[in-house]
Structures are given as structure tokens and as C-alpha cells.
Image: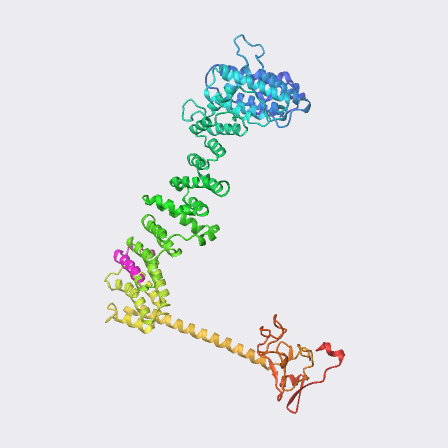
Amino acid sequence: MLEALEACIVHLDVSSLDIDQVMRLCRTSGLYDAMIHILNRGLRDYVTPLEELMPILQTALATGKQLSDSHIALGNKLLVYISCCLAGRAYPLSGDVPAEDNQRVRHEVFKCLTCLHSKNAADSEQPYPYLRALLHFDTREFLNVLALAFEEPEFTSELGLRQVQRLVDILLLVMVQQGDGFTPSQVGSLFTFLARQLAKPWCSLHVERQLFEQVVEFLTIDSGSSSTMGHHEERQQALLELMRAGGLAHYDQDKLLRLADKAAFYRVCEHLYEQRRQYDRILHCYLRDPLRKPQVFSYLRNILLLYTSAADRAKVETQIADNIRELLDIDATKTGQVLLQHVPQLVPRIVGILQEEPRVLFQFLQGLFDCREAHSSLAQLKDELNFDPALVERYIELLCEFSPEKVYPYVTSSDGYRLDNAIQITKRFSQVEATAFLLEKTGDFQGALSLMMEKVTGLLAEGVAENIDTDELRSLFNKCVGLCQRGSAMLDEKSREALWFPLLETLMRPQRREKPVSLSELKELTQQLLTSMSGYVSLPAVIQVILMDPAYKGGKFGDIRELMMGMLSNSCYEETLLQATAHLLSTDLHHRLAKLLAASNQGISPCSLTCAVCQNFLHVLKDDDRSIVFRCGHAYHASCLEEPWQCCHCSTASPITAACPPVMPQPVISPTRAAPTSLASQGLLQSQDFGLRLAPPPPPDLEGVF
């Protein structure tokens, strides 16, 4: 249980252990984490683990054979341990190196890594044995450890930068100048590391110009060669960072562009083209980069909307037209969206280019029309952009050829085409439902129904009882019924009969056979048809047609019993429905009249005894003048109002010319010869000598009541 033992040791207080005994156990059993923990925490020694463990890894590497799992685990532990020490982190547990030891640990570990020879070195030992061993074990990961360590603030100081410069010089000496035993892939990893370090803002590394060229050549070496390094994107990113940091300002830009294009570094090419303002060439970088193809539409939106002049825009438009096939292969809908939003004037040109390639043209138009119809954000553009009718008709033709199932949905939901031309196209491709819809739009309901009935007849003629497609039959039947109902609203009685009866004949004809196809299904559809047409065709005419049919003429009543009983039941239902509706209307009318009568018999009490306009008492009348009281309670002199009389207070307009009706539209007028009994009964008006006289005004202290 060595793993459990090691896990226990690293969690124990070192002062409670017999260090000599435990260290012997760790060395003999390969408990490397426990050994590192004891040396670090117990003895505050961070170099001895490297000096004891590195020879084990060197011996395994010297054999030239595949490393065992234990040796690979040891090498990975050493990389993590070095990274933690250089970053000031504790190992193998979480935490930090004690603050008083932090700087010393970094210095000692760095010195150990860059030592010229190890302790007790043999005469044949090569210089910098520890660096060589780690580079041979995993070049890329060891350089990543160094790059991560160099991000620490201690390595950005003057002393730290000198340490970085010394380490870089040693790496170049070991891997490039001597270079024995390192593959081009490993050397390429070194140059990637150098490129990233040179791109740092605080970097002050001194590298020969010849080495710069060597770095660029290694980074841009053709990825198709068998002797190149992997990690294509990593190399490209390193070169891109080096360029953006100005590390290649002195380098021949044309040569760099050729090398980047050859290495398929399309982001590098984009950066160079952008510096030269060759925006049209950037489109090729996106189309040739498999990882960034879907991003080409975002680039086109930005470049057409923000950055280009008129001349640059014209070049970009030319490139769009020349590469329209590739754009359509990526996403036809997004291609159409870019064209509609930014370069709608390019559509006719592209259509002309693709005329000889119907399938590609269909793909383009489909993306164009789908985008125009689907995106709500283009609603304003949809209203402003009217496609040429010839283009719409060409799209309908291509739909008929390559996607016939979409023809009917399109013609029913879109417009912009000429009906005559569209009818000819759909007829040529035998699009029955689409043709019927277009004929219906022209007002030819009979022709539209004839086409639909031909399809129904063909379906009934081809089917047998076992395999007839009842779902398709019902769908066609419902469309025919809907067509007849829409047409009946615009036709007279004879035309309606001429429209409905052929459909009835189409359903009844198969029932005359000795073995009709799906008899029960046909009878059910016939019953539904009779129910649907009952609101448009008179019942006697329907009965006459049924009785004159050869299938029922001269037969027994049982042959037509179901049809007749269904029609009679429907007639009874409609009669009951009519009676119930009439009863509801009569009851509602009675209640409304009773309510109006009750309201007209109610007394009206003015809210004031003065005219609401002139503020004089209502009983002060001029010759032939009258007092008017509205049902809202406001009262006026007739001479103070303009005809038609309306309450001024119940209107938002000016008082005299108000057009807003009062609460009750008819005012109660007090005639000069007959005072209303309702007012007199309330003590507000008194009748004397067949004339109207208001009662005396109340005392001043009671005016507020009125």
C-alpha cells in the first residue's frame, strides 16, 4: 500500500518522523513526493530533490528506449516541482514556500538547472546535464514551465532579466549551436518559446538578427513536410505575437508574407494584408482557413460597414462575386443576409454569373429569399427592397426543379411574381396545388377546383382498398372544400352550384363500382362535403342531385338512407341553431327596450337651479325661451345652447360648440305649456296656468344641497 503510505507521509508533521528511516524507505520504494516533502519541510532543502532524482531520469534517457510509466511519472513530477519552486508554490501539497525562503529557493533551483556540471560528474558528462535531460524528456512542456516562471515579477526585474538572458543563451547553445540529439520539432519548440518571449513588452533579450531569420524559417516551415514540428496553431500564434510586438519590423515583409502563405498561417497573412490595406485579399485568408471559414461573414459585415473606402469597397465586392460559390457552400442564408444588408446592388451581377449553373443559382436565391423572409430585423429592408419579378419567377422555376415540396408554401406566403408567368411555370412542372392557388388568385375558382379534382380522381383510381393513402386523400379533400367555400363568397347561386356539384360527383362516382375503393372513407367524406356545402347551396338542389345519381336512381331507400339522414340531421341542427339565435336576440332586444323605457320614466333632478352657462336662475326666462335639463343633471337655458343641444360639461370641447354627446343623448325639454310630471312630482317644477315656473330658490344656506 505504497500510495496510501505516501499520502499519509505528506500530511504528517515532519518533526514527528524518523527522517533517516523514512528517507531510506522513500528511496527504496520510489516515494518521490514523500521524499520531496520531507526535504522541503523538514530540512528546508529544495535542491537535493533535483540532485537525487535527475540522475534517475538521465539514466533512463541514456538507454534510448521507450520510457517506462514510472520514469514518465518521475519526469512529470520534476517539471511540476520546478514550476512550483520558480513560482514560489509548495509541492506536493497546496500552499506557498515560506516568505523568508522564497527568493533563496528561486535562486538555488535556477542555479541548479543552469549548472555546468552535476555533482560527482564523470569526465564524459556533457555541459548543462540537467537542462539537457529535461529538454530531451519533453521539450515543449519544459519550455512552457520556463515561460510560466518568467511571468513572475521576480524575473521582470533587472536581475531577473539577466537570469532569463543567461538561460536563453544556454538553450541556444545546447539546442542550436551544438544541436546534437535534438529533432527539428524540438528546435522549433525552442524558437516558438523565443518568439513569445521576444513579444513581451518588458523583454530585453539580445538575439542575433540571423537567429531572427532562423526563428521565422522554423516557425513558417511547410507543415506538409515530414521533418516539421507539430502544433500548427501554436507556431502561428507565436509568430503573430512576435510581429505585433515589433520584433520583425526589420524583416522583409514580402518574404514574410510568402513564408506565412506557404505555411498556411492565414492569420499572419491577414495581419500583413491589413497593414497594407489590401482588404480584398483578406477574404481569401478566411476562405482558405478551415477553422475560420464560418467567421468570414462577420469579417465582411465589419469591412463593408466600417473600414473601407469606396475604392476598397469595390475591390471587396469584386472578391465576393468571384468567390460566391465558396460563400454559398459555407452558409447560403448568411451570404444572402450580407448581400441584402450591405451590397444589394451586387445581386443582379451574381445572378448573371451563376446563370449557367442552375443548382448553385438555386442555392444562392434560396439563401437570399429565406433570409429576406425569415429575419425580422430585415423587415424595413424587406419593404424597401423589391426583387425584380423575373428574378422571383426564376426562383419559383428553380424551386420546381430542385425542391418541389417548397413550391406551394412559397407561392402562398410570398408575392412579387406575375400570376400569368407563375401559372405557366407551375403547370410546366405539374405543381397542381400551386397552380390551383394561383388560379384562385386570378378568380378562376372553377379552373383551380378542376385541377384539384383531377388529383383526387387520380388518387382514387390508382388506390385499392388496402394501400390507398387516406391522409393524402383527406388533405386534398379539405383543400378542395376550402377552395369552394372561398369561391362561394364571391359567386351567385348558379355559379356556387357549378362549383360544389362537380366535387360531389367526384366523391360519388367511385361509389358506383361493384367494389369501391375505401367505401367507408368515401361515405364519410361525402357526408362532410354535404355538411360543408349546406351553407352555400340550397337543400332541394342537393337532394335532387343525389336522387338523380345513377347509383341511387331506381334503388331502395336503404341505398341513400345514410346520406339523407345526415342531411336531415344537419338541417334540424341548423333550424335549432337559428331558433336559439332568434330567441337570444329577441330576449336581448326586450331587455334593452325595457331598460330604456324604465330610464325614460325616471325623474330628473338638476344638480343646480342656475344655468350652467350664464349662471342665471333657470326660472328667469326670456320670451319663447325654455329650460333644458339633461339626464346627466346639468341644466341650461335653450338660448344659451346651440343646436344640436348637447351638455357642455360632459364634453372636452368648448362649452357651447361641444360635439361630445351627453350621458343620455336625448335631453328632457320642459315645454311652456306642459311641465313634466316627473319634475313636478319632485317639487322642483310647478305648473301654473299651463306654463312652467320654477319653484322659489331655497334659502342661501341650503344652496349647497342643490
Q: Is residue 706 above or below residue 287?
A: below
- Image position, residue 559 (x, y; %): 27, 68
Q: Position of residue 548 (x, y in %)?
A: 26, 71
Q: Can residue 603 be seen in this snapshot?
A: no
Please state if 67 lies on the left or on the right of 533 as rendered. Answer: right
Q: Horizontal placement of 301 versus 511: left or right?
A: right
Which stretch appears magenta?
Answer: 448-471
- Residue at left 36%, top 69%? 536
Query: Whole-percent x and y of residue 518?
Result: 29, 59
Name the residue nearer the viewer: 443 or 121: 443
Residue 537 sits above or below residue 97 on the image: below
Query: For residue 531, which quarter of the picture?
Result: bottom left
Vertical comparison of 534 with 698: above or below: above
User: Is residue 613 visible from the viewing direction of this image?
Assistant: yes
Task: Name the one closer to the observer, 94 or 292.
Answer: 292
- Residue 606: % across, % down: 66, 79
Taking the magenta stretch, the answer to whether it contains residue 226 is no
Q: Quadrant of the C terminus?
A: bottom right
Q: Is residue 454 magenta?
A: yes
Residue shown at the point (40%, 56%) measured from the top left: 413
When asked about the image quadrant of residue 254, the answer is: top left
Q: Does the magenta stretch mainly form a helix, a strand or a loop?
A: helix
**Count of numbered tags:** 0
